[in-house]
């Protein structure tokens, strides 16, 4: 009996299995984690998955084939000093560095021998899942493989995700992802938000021209980027109202924030013992995969250690070296920690983080309060948003020293409101009709079943920006009113002129 059921399930899955290509050329590990988690789940559910990326799996996985895009990770490592530079200044600082990085990685992908081999192999794909990060030319693979594309917006529901599908994002109440503004912005903040949004649109237009040139460099009769928008079926946004301010969504923007977070597993034996035996609890400190702690100025490293030495808690510090000078006894360093499993341990009291979106979501998933030290990019908006939600304290890197860190640690470790608010937000993230992963898988399979799901697209994504904003209509109305006013004025002047002439003639007579 059971053998028949198993055979039935096998053949149903086999019959419905699809060929799925994951294209994650960007060497940001946090971006890759999202793609890998979703593709592995699709492979578990019987689909045949091919993943092209700089991060091949260390161990084989059923139904999952790796294509190693060599040279891309090495290029990013050579540029890693840019991340510290981006900490200084306003929202546009570092944009050129990021653009150069993504342009170089896009070109390396378009020109990669492994991608050429894949194209020549004649392999057919039912859908392509890509990392969406200022890389418009990558949409060409939808055309080359004749397959719909699903971009995953690792940064959440920002302008990068919105414009590709025409999703509205009024700057009056939706802050730009690079700005530390609350949704209820002041007049000055709304003005700055509007100007920065315009500036990013200008940068986006310039970047689009660069990617168009890339297409024309590598492909004959290359289509325009506007034409390639037709390959985009929907966007999976790494967003959710539990950590993003509420905002509108068109049908083909699907919020799946938190789909990468798994149930915490038991830690390796030594770490499990370390955390279990922490009488006062544990503080976990990590600056993520791009920004490394070893890149901090040595003086700041020592100031941080002095502050840690003052607290009774044990500290886990993700430190990318074997040694750390003057390390106190309550600090344990390692080049890598199983972050999700640490955040899920009941003895963890605080997460000190750069505020990357994945780390912020993981902390929220497990109900852990945050001490945020934003370095660059959306981190400078994620942490203020967490502060306004009541589960975080913010500390600027420029202000980080023994005194400020000690004060921040004392505030968040002794005031129960941060823990309480983290738990409340965690409940919001968990209180959904379907898990984020089930939602993501459903919509991928929906696109496959409905051959690209053209019924989800809205016409706003095809309109030029001036039509989308109704500027052409506004200009017509203004010109029409000016013409009407001009004609009325002309008629009045003529009438007045005739009356004056008549009166003058009557006087003379």
Image (cartoon, rainbow, N blue to C red):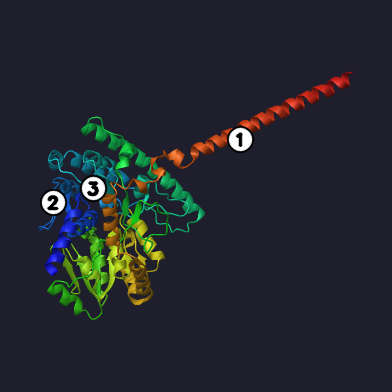
Residue contact at pointers 1 and 2, CB within 8 angstroms: no
Query: Residue 224: image x %, image y %?
Result: 31, 35
Q: Is residue 297 left or right of residue 56?
A: right
Circle 3: element type = strand
Query: Residue 150: image x %, image y %?
Result: 28, 49
**10 Å crowding of disc 2: few (<14), some (14-19), many (20+):** some
Distance (Cα) linking label 3 and label 1:
50 Å
Dot 2 corresponds to which residue?
Answer: 66
For image coordinates 24% across by 54% down, the residue present is: 31
If the image is split into quadrants, where does the C terminus sit?
Answer: top right
Circle 1: element type = helix
Residue contact at pointers 2 and 3, CB within 8 angstroms: no
User: Of tags 3 and 1, which is closer to the observer?
Assistant: 3
Distance (Cα) linking label 2 and label 3:
14 Å
Instruction: Count up the numbered dots.
Output: 3
In the picture, the disc for residue 481 is 1
Is residue 185 shown above or below 208?
below
Distance (Cα) linking label 1 and label 2:
62 Å
Is residue 157 shown above or below 261?
above
| First in sequence: mark 2 vs mark 3 | 2
For image coordinates 52% across by 38% down, the residue present is: 473
Residue 92 seen: no
Dot 3 corresponds to which residue?
Answer: 128
Circle 2: element type = strand
User: Of tags 2 and 3, which is closer to the observer?
Assistant: 3
| Nearer the observer, 249 or 242 | 249
């Amino acid at each position: 009996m059971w053998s028949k059921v198993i055979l039935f399930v096998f053949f149903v899955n086999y019959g419905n299995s699809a060929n799925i290509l994951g294209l994650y050329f960007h060497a940001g590990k946090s971006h890759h984690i999202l793609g890998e988690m979703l593709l592995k789940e699709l492979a578990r559910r019987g689909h045949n998955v091919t993943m092209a990326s700089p991060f091949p799996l260390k161990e084989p996985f059923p139904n999952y084939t790796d294509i190693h895009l060599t040279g891309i990770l090495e290029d990013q490592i050579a540029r890693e000093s840019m991340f510290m530079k981006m900490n200084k200044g306003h929202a546009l600082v570092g944009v050129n560095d990021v653009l150069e990085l993504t342009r170089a990685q896009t070109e390396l992908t378009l020109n990669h021998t492994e991608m050429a081999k894949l194209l020549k192999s004649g392999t057919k794909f039912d859908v392509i899942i890509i990392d969406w990060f200022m890389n418009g030319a990558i949409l060409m693979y939808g055309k080359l493989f004749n397959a719909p594309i699903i971009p995953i917006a690792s940064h959440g529901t920002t302008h990068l995700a919105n414009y590709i599908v025409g999703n509205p994002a009024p700057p009056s109440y939706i802050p730009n992802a690079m700005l530390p503004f609350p949704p209820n912005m002041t007049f000055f903040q709304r003005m700055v938000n509007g100007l920065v949004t315009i500036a990013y649109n200008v940068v986006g237009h310039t970047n689009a021209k660069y990617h168009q040139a890339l297409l024309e460099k590598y492909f004959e009769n290359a289509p325009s980027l506007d034409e390639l928008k037709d390959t985009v079926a929907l966007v999976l946004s790494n967003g959710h109202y539990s950590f993003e301010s509420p905002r509108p969504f068109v049908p083909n923007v699907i919020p799946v924030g938190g789909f990468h977070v798994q149930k915490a597993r038991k830690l390796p034996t030594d770490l499990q013992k370390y955390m279990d035996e922490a009488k006062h609890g544990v503080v976990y400190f990590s600056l993520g995969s791009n920004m490394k702690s070893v890149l901090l100025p040595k003086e700041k490293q020592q100031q941080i250690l002095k502050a840690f030495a003052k607290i009774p808690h044990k500290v886990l510090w993700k430190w990318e070296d074997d040694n750390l000078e003057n390390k106190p006894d309550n600090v344990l360093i390692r080049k890598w920690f199983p972050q999700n499993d640490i955040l899920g341990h009941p003895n963890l009291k605080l997460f000190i983080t750069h505020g990357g979106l994945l780390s912020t979501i993981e902390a929220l998933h497990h109900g852990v309060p945050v001490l945020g030290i934003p370095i660059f990019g959306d981190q400078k908006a994620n942490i203020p948003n967490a502060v306004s939600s009541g589960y975080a304290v913010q500390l600027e890197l420029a202000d980080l020293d023994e005194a400020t860190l000690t004060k921040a640690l004392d505030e968040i470790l002794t005031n129960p409101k941060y823990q309480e608010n983290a738990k409340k937000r965690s409940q919001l993230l968990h209180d959904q009709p379907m898990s984020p992963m089930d939602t993501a898988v459903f919509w991928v399979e929906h696109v496959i079943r409905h051959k690209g799901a053209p019924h989800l697209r809205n016409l706003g994504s095809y309109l030029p920006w001036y039509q989308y904003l109704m500027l052409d209509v506004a200009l017509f109305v203004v010109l029409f009113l000016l013409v009407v006013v001009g004609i009325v004025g002309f008629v009045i002047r003529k009438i007045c002129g005739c009356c004056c002439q008549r009166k003058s003639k009557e006087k003379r007579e």
